[in-house]
Amino acid sequence: MKNPGIHHVTAISGPARRNVDFYTGVLGLRLVKKTVNFDDPGTYHLYFGDENGTPGTILTFFPWDNVAKGRVGVGETQQTLFRVPEGSIGYWAHRFVEKGIEHENVAKAFGETVLSFRDPDGMRLALVGTPGAEAEPAWTSDGIPAEHAIRGFHSVNLLLAKAAPTAAILTDVFGFTEIAREGSVIRLKAGETKNGGIVDLHEAGGFLAGRAGGGSVHHIAFRAENDAAQKEMVARLQKAHGIRTTEQKDRNYFRSVYFREPGGVLFEIATDEPGFAADEPVAELGRTLKLPSFLEPHRSRIEGVLPELA
Ligand code: ZN
């Protein structure tokens, strides 16, 4: 399997402008695509990532002005973690204090340094100090030097009643392997993939179910190199696990199928093709509102209902 791992993570947020200010201004990610929710064109779909919008770096949001707060529970993503260079955790802790960002004391997990924090909607995030990350390319903006910049996803942590059924899907269909256990957390890794190569399964037993809302993750997308690879995964899901996916949906920048994994988390399989430069050059990613061709005739009406971002 080529480049297994997380393709993107999609979450729900409050007001769009506050969301953009946080992810570009505080965390220094690039807004790589400004479009709308194809299934609900009156709301934005905002994509943040690295310079090119590389799979494994993409965090996306459906922002709602008056969203009710979500609650993390079983069958949900508990935390979304980013990779930063190992020596940069102090820089970020200082930045969070300076900017009044809610955060915890630095902790250790699986031998790595973890700085947990929350976005303005209470979404649970963390930075993980990763040896060697300083040598990888980084998108820089707003005064965050390349040596400290976020590289992409480290992992997601899924809160589950039982870990084994979810682990079976990740190992059998998405190319992950169990590499470690710590307390009630099982760590799975996807080959040599750096960005988005880890999923942690936190087995919580009988715990309150989650409730979708502001600050909660809507789904996790895993990478398929192309349509053929996606098709193979879909067949494997059905044959070996009795799981049916949706029909393929064209998301303009990737093509997707969706299914609910046995632990209750919504999973997607997204192709690496064609990528975010499909409808605008890399140098201009995220600057103007992009619409799929079927919504282009309604552009003026859509622009009329979307809130200003800056
Ligand atoms: Zn998605």
Image: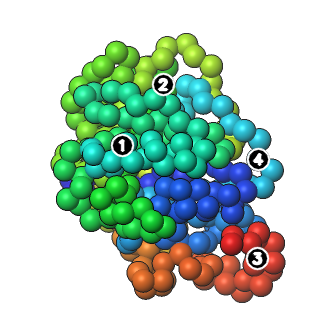
Return the residue at label 4. Answer: 67
Position of the C terminus by quadrant: bottom right
214 vs 262, left or right, is: right
Disc 1 beta carbon < 8 A from ligand 1? no
Report the Cα–Cα distance between label 2 and label 4. 25 Å
CB atoms of marks 2 and 3 within 8 Å: no
Q: Amino acid at mark 4?
A: Val
Which mark's residue is nearer the viewer, 4 or 3?
4
Return the residue at label 2. Answer: 160
Q: Amino acid at mark 1?
A: Ile
Return the residue at label 3. Answer: 302
Residue at figure coordinates x 63%, y 79% from the top left? 289
Which mark's residue is nearer the viewer, 1 or 3?
1
Q: Is residue 77 visible?
A: no
Q: Residue 194's x, y, as percent?
A: 25, 51
Q: Earlier in the sequence, mark 1 or mark 4?
A: 4
Q: Which mark is residue 284?
A: none
Q: Earlier in the sequence, mark 2 or mark 1?
A: 1
User: Toward which corner of the image does residue 255 lie, by quadrant?
Assistant: bottom left
Q: Earlier in the sequence, mark 1 or mark 3?
A: 1
